[in-house]
Image (cartoon, rainbow, N blue to C red):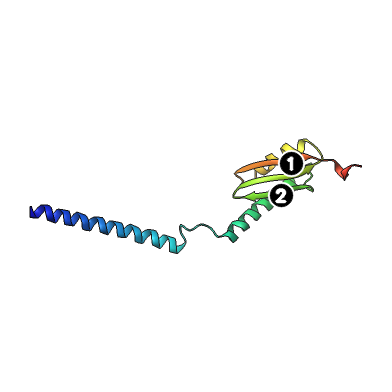
Amino acid sequence: MKATDILKALGVVVCIAVASSAYAQSDAMASSGTMAAPSAKATKQTNRKLGLAVRKALAKAQGFDVSNVYVRARGGAVTLTGTVPDGSQISQAEEVAKSVPGVTSVTNKITLGIQGGGG
């Protein structure tokens, strides 16, 4: 009977020790920033860099008019909006954007526009 009581007490002590050790580790990781989410400023800067990289790739694409195309990047997802003078440039813009490192998806909302506004 005494041996059973000692084993039960030892089991409780081991459970408490393991639980407090796990809490101490997760608390230390949170305070050190290892597991913390990136700051809003860092996220905004990353999104801006990705958007600029896509725009630069579009500007370098042969035969592509980037003057009326707008790029928005959010966490790897890129949205293209605006107009292009030639219908083939719509799919070209999407392919170029997909080829940029860091782009995880592309939403293409580019439309065909008339050069010079017409009229």
Rendered-image quadrant of the C terminus: top right
Specify few, some or many for label 2: CA neighbours under 10 Å numbering under 14, 14-19, or 20 or more.
many
Expressed as whole percent of the image width and height from the top left, the position of residue 112 reads 79, 38
Which residue is at the front of the view, 53 or 13? 13
Quarter of the view holding residue 63: top right
> Please, what secondary structure does the residue beneath circle 1 have?
strand
Task: Tell me which residue sits at (9%, 54%) in the image.
Answer: 3
> Please, what secondary structure does the residue beneath circle 2 have?
helix
Report the Cα–Cα distance between label 2 and label 1: 14 Å
- Front position among marks 2 and 1: 1
Q: Which residue is mark 1?
A: 110
Describe residue 92's horizontal placement relative to residue 17 as left or right.
Answer: right
Which residue is at the front of the view, 92 or 23? 23
| Residue 101 in sight in this render | no
Task: Tell me which residue sits at (65%, 55%) in the image.
Answer: 49
| Residue 28 in sight in this render | yes
Q: In the displayed orientation, state which residue is furthest to the left.
A: 1
Describe residue 24's horizontal placement relative to residue 115 as left or right.
Answer: left
Describe residue 85's horizontal placement relative to residue 31 as left or right.
Answer: right
| Amino acid at dot 2 | Arg
Expressed as whole percent of the image width and height from the top left, the position of residue 54 reads 68, 48
Specify the label residue 55 is tagged with: 2
Specify the label residue 81 is tagged with: none
Dot 2 or dot 1: first in sequence order is 2
| Amino acid at dot 1 | Ile
Expressed as whole percent of the image width and height from the top left, the position of residue 104 reads 59, 44
- Relative to 13, does residue 115 appear above or below in the rendering? above
Task: Tell me which residue sits at (30%, 60%) in the image.
Answer: 20
- Relative to 37, does residue 103 appear above or below in the rendering? above
